[in-house]
Amino acid sequence: MGKEPTAAAAVTSADVARLAGVSRATVSFVLNNTQAHRVSATTRARVLAAAQQLGYVPHAAARSLRAGRSNLVLMPASVSAVGSLVSAWIDDLQSELEQHGYVTVLHAGRFSDPVSAARAWAELRPAAVLALDGDSLTDQAADVLGRAGVRGVLAFASHDVKGVHTIGFDHARVGALAAEHLVSRGRRNIGVIMPRERGLATFARPRLAGAQQVAARSTAAAVTAVEMSYTHESAAELAGHWRESGLDGVFAYNDDYAALLLHALRNKGVTVPGDVAVVGADDLVLAALQQPPLTTVRLDLPTPAQVADALHELVDRGVPPEVPGMEPVLVHRQSS
Amino acid sequence: MGKEPTAAAAVTSADVARLAGVSRATVSFVLNNTQAHRVSATTRARVLAAAQQLGYVPHAAARSLRAGRSNLVLMPASVSAVGSLVSAWIDDLQSELEQHGYVTVLHAGRFSDPVSAARAWAELRPAAVLALDGDSLTDQAADVLGRAGVRGVLAFASHDVKGVHTIGFDHARVGALAAEHLVSRGRRNIGVIMPRERGLATFARPRLAGAQQVAARSTAAAVTAVEMSYTHESAAELAGHWRESGLDGVFAYNDDYAALLLHALRNKGVTVPGDVAVVGADDLVLAALQQPPLTTVRLDLPTPAQVADALHELVDRGVPPEVPGMEPVLVHRQSS
DNA sequence: GCCTGTCGGTAACGCGTGTAACCTGGAGGG
DNA sequence: CCCTCCAGGTTACACGCGTTACCGACAGGC
């Protein structure tokens, strides 16, 4: 009960041992149910009682230091970059990994380059790193992780990186799909929204590139990048100059951005899909709520269980089974 | 260059020492720029070169084990429970803490009770725990953290908990504000949406309670809890039976839920605010985009810098400066 | 009485670090 | 020549834990 007001030292297994009147080894045997060593029922009870009384909790770092491997899974991701789409997916993945005995942790830092990012992750000595924006991983970064003893590096990425097991996640396909759809609806001047919000560029750039490739193939269409922030002001300004831009189709990066832009366009008297066709992405709940309902690109992700199993295999045996990549699907509604 | 295909052992400072031809201590002195000890320029260069060549990254766990304290800040929170509102705030907080030398990490687990949750957090031996849903913290949970040597426990909560430094965050006030507004607009039968999504209950329950208190004071009004999932089907079903419910006002927990409900109501021919007034919360960007624009409760949070400073003071000196709590403000638009 | 097991416990080491304490060789002052 | 001092290195320990090897006591078979 009596908690020290002054810097209470942490309770260690040695404290438990002292209180129970046994050695630290015995405490370890009891608390870990070590099968190789037998402990009498009475001492076992004494140890458990002492641990309970002191509120002992083992020190994960010391444990994995001794064991030579950790059960930490690091997901480098900023909370805001994770859209509403993936957040539920991440939660489920976390539960799956928990059942495998892993502790999953999200960490976002602002890093200048991939290698210093990898260095920061490596300091934590996770068992595995699961990168959602795997395209920002270089092979030097993967090398840093490997030298730090990270057993598995899994990444959603469009291209292979040495030392990284990639799960197909080609954002270029998303942009291409949207652009192809707009072209097939007769649009020729296609704008692609590039969010100014930091952290979204890694996804936005390849989506733009995908759209540009489509334009390059079909000679009739042209693609223009259009910057926009996720604010009413930015959307209103964009919509205000829309007619001058001559754009008759737009891929808005996201359903969130699309909804914001849609509203601003209507306010300025630009009709959708009459004057301009709008396509979002992620197929969020709000997409269907828009006026007109929003055409969007749905992203079918591999199930959390599949990814969790793959990660476990990778950490445990070194060779993961194949995981199906992300498959983008166009959902046609009235905005295009 | 040659990376071992078979379980490459992690690079340690001993490896660096061996390659540089010095002792491990010297390596430590060089890499940490220890002022108390002088190292000649030539050996310093040799050590740095060796570390560079091997790609050495220090082992954070071993370091904090030795140092007796960690620089980890743990934020228990599931990604999906963190609304769009707080996600940007969290990112900023993370940068602030990074400048203070902390590594911030998000962790969500499904726990049966507060104490086992605290135990899981305590295993990581963080310097501090920052709980966003602080109302699920008990004093036993705080005790577990304290005994594990966690220096500071900060929580957004409505009530004080022994051993926890709370930052005022009274969700009951949010519900109360919404209810008062609806009553002042002449509404008498007020529904409060309770999301079925897991993890949101800790916020939803006090919001409901706040609304109920308002109803208890003003004899004219009644409050009913209404369950709803964040899906089109659930919203449609709710809207389909709306007239029978007799509700003429609703606090929809959230702008997201409010937008979904708004749309479903319109589909069923229920007019807003004619038949029913709708109030959301969080003042998300999409709130102003709705038809009609959504009345909402904006939550003014303390700045990330304030919280980061408080946390640092708490960890460093044990006594944090006061941090202003969350202040809910009603934003009136046309949906009520 | 001696050898052989088995049961129940402990001593000791190492994981990767940081740092206090301790050497050593050479320069300088008396 | 001896003592002192300092620069520049090393040795040794501790952090909290898991585990291997050891050890004493006691029972049983010859």
Image: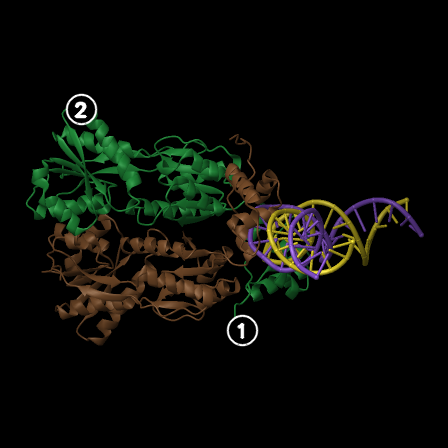
Chain colours: A green, B brown, C purple, D yellow
Residue farthest toward the left in the current orientation of the protein:
A269
Residue A59, placed above or below residue A313: below
Task: Answer whether residue A329 is visible to the viewer in this image.
Answer: no
Q: Which of disc 2 and disc 1 is earlier in sequence? A: 1
Neighbours of disc 1 within 10 Å: few (<14), some (14-19), many (20+): few
Residue placed under numbered mark 1 in the picture: A2
Kindly identify the amino acid type of the residue bearing the numbered disc 2: Ser
Q: In the displayed structure, does residue B262 sit left or right of residue A318? A: left
Residue B86, placed above or below residue B40: below
Q: Are marks 1 and 2 on the same chain?
A: yes
Question: Residue at 10% across / 53% down in the picture?
Answer: B269
State the residue in front, B310 or C26. C26
Image quarter hosting the C terminus of chain B: bottom left
Question: Residue at 42% across / 65% down in the picture?
Answer: B313
Q: Are marks 1 and 2 in contact (CB under 8 Å)?
A: no
Quarter of the view holding residue B164: bottom left
Q: CA distance from mark 1 to mark 2?
A: 76 Å
Task: Answer whether residue B20 is visible to the viewer in this image.
Answer: yes
Front disc: 1 or 2: 2
Residue placed under numbered mark 2 in the picture: A218
- Chain to which mark 1 belongs: A
**Residue A126 x, y percent position in the rendering:** 48, 45
Kindly identify the amino acid type of the residue bearing the numbered disc 1: Gly
Quarter of the view holding residue A250: top left
State the residue in front, B330 or B31. B31
For mark 1, give the secondary structure. Answer: loop
**Residue B115 x, y percent position in the rendering:** 47, 62
State the residue in front, A265 or C14. C14
Q: In the displayed structure, does residue B256 sit left or right of residue A154? A: left
State the residue in front, B70 or C6. B70
Q: In the displayed structure, does residue A221 sit left or right of residue C25? A: left
**Residue B72 x, y percent position in the rendering:** 46, 55
